[in-house]
Image (spheres, rainbow, N blue to C red):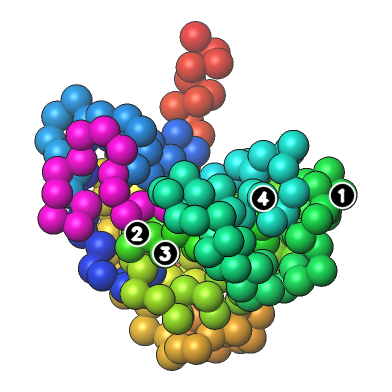
Amino acid sequence: MRDLTFEVARGEFCAIVGPTGSGKSTTLNLIAGLERPSRGQVVVLGEVVTDGARGVGYMFQTDAIFPWKTVLQNVCTGPLYRGVPRHVAQRQAHEWISRVGLAGFEDRYPNQLSGGMRKRVALAQTLINEPAVLLMDEPFASLDVQTRTLMENELLELWSGSSASVVFVTHDLEEAIALADRVLVFTAAPATVKQSYRIALPRPRNVAEVRFDPRFTQLYERIWEDLRDEAVIAYERSLKAIRS
């Protein structure tokens, strides 16, 4: 990436789209403090990020839940790590497990759950820590269409009850528009912000129904023009690399 500058306001849902290899996941890693920028700086909640950023939750594309722990134990992990007494952590975990629709599955292990249920565990495991900034790297990409829609609506409902800022990376432009307040289009690498689009669709939203809004179609067409051009550049570069 190069000359990449953007801000996300408190409570804003910001989605990032761009060609494969344009640095979308790297951007999340920089915000989280998992990688350090070679130039420039990342500021989260008014502090320059050096190592791990405080107040940040990260939900990965692959399941980041512990296979040897039950649902309850997985969701308790964050509070226990922060020193919350076990009985308090378990009470909080039961509340979050119920909020994501998994009440009654507290004693199950990840291999006993469907893909959608594991995503719900990961969501509860992240949100129980009440992050001020929530990073999400294609969290629902592996799910079937129906389950994905349910999880997207679940996310919007849970997020609406918080003041968290969300930075959401996706390859699905429809998903980005349906969820976000703003969509950033990254250029082909080295990435910079090509365009920022304000998504003026009313909330609360149902991600399945909002796609039928004429304004949704108009936004999709405008953003796709920018995204398509960058995808073509990235594709042509990959072909040249293969041929060489």
Outermost top residue? 244
At x 64%, y 49%, the residue is 74
| Circles 3 and 2: CB atoms closer than 8 Å | no
At x 26%, y 33%, the residue is 51
Residue 57 included in the magenta stretch of the image? yes
**Whole-percent x, y for residue 56 in the image:** 36, 52
Q: Which amino acid does the dot numbered 1 rest on? A: Gln
Q: Which amino acid does the dot numbered 2 rest on? A: Val
Disc 3 target residue:
130
Disc 1 target residue:
112
Outermost right residue? 112
Lower sequence index among marks 4 and 1: 4
Q: Which residues are magenta?
A: 44-59
Gap in angstroms between the C-alphas marked 4 and 1:
15 Å
Q: Residues within 10 Å of mark 3 (few under 14, many from 20)?
A: some
Image-quadrant location for residue 111: top right
Gap in angstroms between the C-alphas marked 4 and 2:
23 Å
Question: Looking at the image, is 221 positioned above or below residue 60?
Answer: below
Q: Which mark is residue 133?
A: 2
